[in-house]
Image: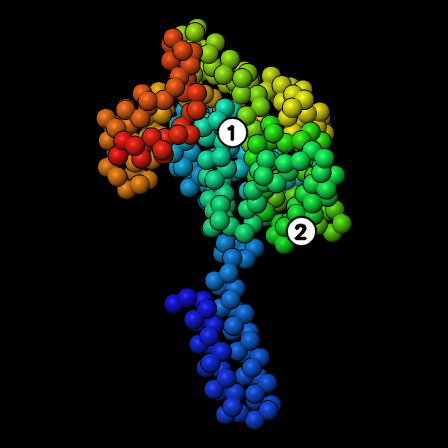
């Protein structure tokens, strides 16, 4: 039964009861009805409490192991970072993750997995907020207004629920200086104007630094090394510096990096043919289709790879898998 129908039934039932009682009893009955109505409303409406927000560490690990392909570094960092943060009942600051890599490598997908592990409603939760640079902050001449609006949005939502999640997509296209407006909320403060941000999660998604990640992956491949041999230490310093010094990135000279407020820079490696096949098989399963290796192979072979002669890495990762499957199934 829908919440609206139940609430209507409660209203009608108590309106009938009210007419049968004297004024004093009526007050009691109406008060009880109102309380019951609020309880029913709270039951169906997502609220900031453990019924709707409860971290599922096992679920996140399973999803990363079974649904994220070719990203051994990202998978390990994400699991440890989120596990550590969510198990800490009194964190000193919000969790701040910056995910970097070329398109189609899984940055948005990992954000979705994190949201699903924390919020019962996943990405549809009213406590998960997504900002896209080209959509929400398109005009450089309005940056002062955007800064004020962004501060208000973050402050208002965290005031509403301290376990809020903010995802900033296309950081490489954000106007430099804008993201610094929320720097105080990411810092080591107990409270700011009576609001604590320490239990919130901030995730930044960017293609910036992708070229350096690809170069490292290519060097390992040319040296005959397994991609699983690539470690965070091979990428982290170069990644953070390249992002910080990129004058076309939202992280250009940002105090978030300068003051070490980004907890983890997470590199996403370029995907190879075998990973694209895995993506295609997983997508077929998600569509309740029987996974067909031959179809997955056709989809994978249909993508563009680089370097052109060796065809090692997919140019668009797994980004176009859904549309390709529409064609082949």
* Along the viewing direction, whichever of 139 and 299 lies nearer the viewer: 139
Callout 2: helix, strand or loop?
A: helix
Q: Which numbered circle lies on residue 77?
A: 1
| Residue 308 relative to residue 23: left or right | left
Q: CA distance from mark 2 to mark 1?
A: 30 Å
Give the image location of residue 302, x and y in percent.
Answer: 32, 22
Q: Check the image and report above or below for 272 versus 261.
A: above
**For mark 2, what is the residue?**
156
How many other residues sit within 10 Å of disc 2, few (<14), some (14-19) or many (≥20)? few
Q: Nearer the viewer, mark 2 or mark 1?
A: 2
Q: Check the image and report above or below for 54 versus 60.
A: below
User: The N terminus is located in which quarter?
Assistant: bottom left
Residue 205, picture quadrant: top right
The tally of labels here is: 2
Give the image location of residue 75, x and y in percent.
Answer: 46, 29
Identified at 56% across, 49% down, the residue is: 127
Q: Residue furthest top?
A: 223
Identified at 51% across, 13% down, the residue is: 215
Q: Residue furthest right?
A: 193
How many other residues sit within 10 Å of disc 1, few (<14), some (14-19) or many (≥20)? some
Q: Earlier in the sequence, mark 2 or mark 1?
A: 1
Residue 208, picture quadrant: top right
Give the image location of residue 67, x and y in percent.
Answer: 38, 34
Identified at 55% across, 76% down, the residue is: 34
Q: Which numbered circle lies on residue 125?
A: none
* Colour convention: rainbow
Identified at 63% across, 54% down, the residue is: 160
Callout 1: helix, strand or loop?
A: helix
Q: Check the image and report above or below for 120 versus 137.
A: below
Give the image location of residue 145, x and y in percent.
Answer: 72, 42
User: The C terminus is located in which quarter?
Assistant: top left
Residue 75 can be seen in this image = no
């Amino acid at each position: 039964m829908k919440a609206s129908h139940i609430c209507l039934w409660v209203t009608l039932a108590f309106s009938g009861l009210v007419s049968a009682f004297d004024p004093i009893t009526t007050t009691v009955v109406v008060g009880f009805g109102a309380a019951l109505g609020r309880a029913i409303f709270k039951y169906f409406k997502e609220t900031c409490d453990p019924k709707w927000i409860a971290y599922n560490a096992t679920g996140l690990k399973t999803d990363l192991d079974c649904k994220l392909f070719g990203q051994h570094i990202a998978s390990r960092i994400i699991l440890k970072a989120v596990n550590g943060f969510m198990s800490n009942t009194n964190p000193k600051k919000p969790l701040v993750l910056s995910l970097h890599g070329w398109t189609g490598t899984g940055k948005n997908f990992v954000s979705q997995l994190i949201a699903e592990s924390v919020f019962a409603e996943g990405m549809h939760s009213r406590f998960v907020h997504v900002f896209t640079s080209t959509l929400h902050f398109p005009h450089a001449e309005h940056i002062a207004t955007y800064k004020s609006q962004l501060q208000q949005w973050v402050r208002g939502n965290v005031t509403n629920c301290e376990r809020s999640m903010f995802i900033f997509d296309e950081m490489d296209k954000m106007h430099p200086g804008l993201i610094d407006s929320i720097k105080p909320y990411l810092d080591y403060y107990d409270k700011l104007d009576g609001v604590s941000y320490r239990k919130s999660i901030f995730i930044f998604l960017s293609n910036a630094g992708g070229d350096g990640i690809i170069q490292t992956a290519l060097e390992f491949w040319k040296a005959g090394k397994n991609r699983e041999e690539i470690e965070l230490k091979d990428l982290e310093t170069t990644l953070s510096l390249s992002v910080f010094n990129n004058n076309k990135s939202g992280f250009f000279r940002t105090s978030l990096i300068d003051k070490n407020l980004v907890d983890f820079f997470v590199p996403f490696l370029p995907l190879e043919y075998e990973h694209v096949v895995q993506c295609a098989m997983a997508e077929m399963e998600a569509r309740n289709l029987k996974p067909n290796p031959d179809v997955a192979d056709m989809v994978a072979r249909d993508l563009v790879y680089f370097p052109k002669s060796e065809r090692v890495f997919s140019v668009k990762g797994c980004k176009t898998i859904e549309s390709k499957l529409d064609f082949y199934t």
